[in-house]
Image (cartoon, helix red, strand yellow):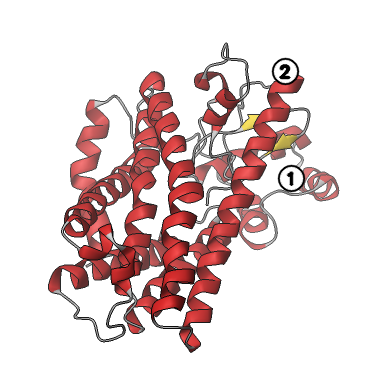
Amino acid sequence: FALFLPNSFRFIAKPCAINLGIQDSGPHRAQPNAILEKVFTSITKSPDGKRLEGLSKQLDWDVRKIQRWFRHRRNQDKPTTLTKFCESMWRFTFYLSIFFYGIRFLWTAPWFWDTRQCWYNYPFQPLTSRLYYYYILELAFYWSLMFSQFTDIKRKDFLIMFVHHLATIGLITFSYMNNMVRVGTLVLCLHDASDFLLEAAKLANYAKYQRLCDAFFMLFGVVFIVTRLGIYPFWILNTTLFESWELIGPYPSWWLFNGLLITLQMLHIIWSYLIIRTAYKALMRGKVRFCQRKDCKLCLLHSFLLFSVPDWSWTVSSFACKCDLCFCLFTETHLCLFQG
């Protein structure tokens, strides 16, 4: 069901995309050639100079023509803007729905207002139907993301996203098996708070509503920093590390669970540090320019941080890159950082 629903959702998303002027037109297709196709599929998708010269002699083609063929062939495998719009619309709908479901559910939960309630009478805490469905929906969604990687077009960030989905599934499953579902719901809801904003920014970007895209992306950045570097350590880690130790003491799975959560926090810190440092250097050098790379997959997440430096004359759209994931900054060196 988790795999069937995203495909069915295309029947809703596709008409919306067409109404917004997004065409189902793919890139220029490469001229059919059995020899080059065999090299592309079996040997390399980006041949070096020596191989290009060999193919040029074999086919009696100019080297530039062969390079152009490989470029068109690589672009041929990339998803169209319409496909990416449908994918982002599905994720936006899920993230938004599950976030508000989580907020509505947690609003009446005692541990939302007092995190010490996560550990009272642990592990003999009842599993309500609403809590169960919340967990199962989240778990099913991440399983669908992981399996869809094998059916969709393979992208450059395949391994990174596969590891991310695998770690997420592991955390959700581990907390469920150890009945740490109360604190688990807090972690899930906190991470869902910013995801739908990023998908909204991507939807606006695909539809070429740049101002709306910039606004959503700035809001996403603010929410991401506040939740991942503010609320997460002082609310989540505080209760898993200190309140749980005080109320129930450490137990075997306590060390693994907190180790995973601390690792997650370290990643948050590293990503934020690299983003702020890159944005600061870019502004200080004054050599930021528009990124034209169509194949850039590992992108900078928070261009809004450029506003943290005292030069308010810049605009977010000055740094907007029309890449698959989000945005990219260029300095003297091309620095790209991946989404967390």
Front residue of 198 and 267: 267
Q: Residue at x 61, y 53 (%)?
A: 37
Task: Judge whether residue 140 can be spotted in this image.
Answer: yes
Identity of the residue furthest to the right in this view: 50
Q: Is 265 positioned to the left or the right of 92 in the image?
A: right
The x and y percentages for residue 191 are 39, 54
Please state which amino acid type lies under the numbered disc 2: Gly
Task: Judge whether residue 25 can be spotted in this image.
Answer: no
Identity of the residue furthest to the front in this view: 246
The disc, 1 or 2, on the residue closer to the chain's N-terminal end is 1
Q: Is residue 312 above or below residue 15?
A: above
Element type at mark 1:
helix
Front residue of 57 and 9: 9
The numbered dot on residue 59 is 1
The x and y percentages for residue 187 are 38, 61
Q: Is residue 259 above or below residue 189?
A: below
Element type at mark 2:
loop
The residue to which callout 2 is attached is 286
